């Protein structure tokens, strides 16, 4: 009986000490609010060309989902999971790494503004 009381006390001490561990919080990048309307032609097109079309083009590694023009990008953003994948912390697109907070804010604002073309 005495031995099991010590085991319980030891187990409780271990659980309490582990539950009080702290985690490191990685600060988020500060992003300046975007006040003007975001459009595909003015803002999103260059992001797609710089970060996406090297794979998402005919003959590319991800040619099954081309992201070359407004219609393709809008459809993937509005009806697919393009924006969710771009914002994902566990499985982001592009696969080379998550885009900067400023770029993600532009994409999110484009969605909020209604996926404007011009």
Image (tube, helix red, strand yellow):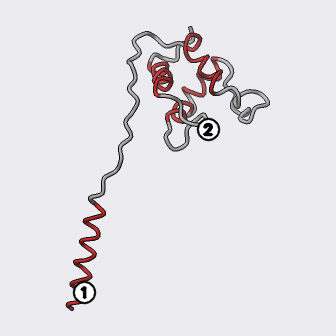
Quadrant in which residue 58 is drawn? top right
- For disc 2, the neighbor class at 10 Å (few under 14, some 14 to 19, many from 20) is few
Q: Residue 48 at what x, y percent from top left?
A: 62, 22
Q: Which image quarter holds the N terminus?
A: bottom left
Identify the residue position indicated by label 1 in the image: 4
Q: Residue at x 61, y 38 (%)?
A: 95
Q: Is residue 62 above or below residue 36?
A: below
* Residue sitting at the far right: 59
Q: Is residue 89 above or below residue 16?
A: above
Quadrant in which residue 19 is drawn? bottom left
Q: Residue at x 51, y 44 (%)?
A: 90
User: Of marks 2 and 1, which one's residue comes earlier in the chain?
Assistant: 1
Q: Residue 111 at what x, y percent from top left?
A: 48, 21
What number is the disc on residue 95? Answer: 2
Q: Would residue 109 be found to the left or right of residue 62 on screen?
A: left
Q: Residue at x 27, y 65 (%)?
A: 17
Q: Which image quarter holds the C terminus?
A: top right
Q: Nearer the viewer, residue 86 or 10?
A: 10
Q: Would residue 86 be found to the left or right of residue 23 on screen?
A: right
- For disc 1, the neighbor class at 10 Å (few under 14, some 14 to 19, many from 20) is few
Q: Residue 22 at what x, y percent from top left?
A: 30, 53
């Amino acid at each position: 009986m005495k031995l099991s009381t010590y085991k319980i006390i030891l187990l409780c001490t271990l659980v309490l000490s582990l539950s009080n561990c702290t985690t490191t919080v990685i600060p988020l990048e500060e992003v300046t609010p975007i006040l003007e309307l975001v459009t595909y032609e003015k803002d999103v097109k260059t992001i797609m060309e710089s970060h996406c079309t090297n794979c998402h083009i005919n003959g590319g590694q991800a040619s099954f989902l081309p992201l070359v023009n407004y219609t393709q990008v809008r459809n993937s953003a509005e009806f697919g999971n393009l924006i969710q994948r771009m914002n994902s912390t566990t499985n982001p697109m592009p696969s080379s790494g998550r885009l900067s907070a400023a770029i993600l804010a532009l994409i999110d604002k484009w969605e909020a503004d209604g996926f404007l073309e011009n």
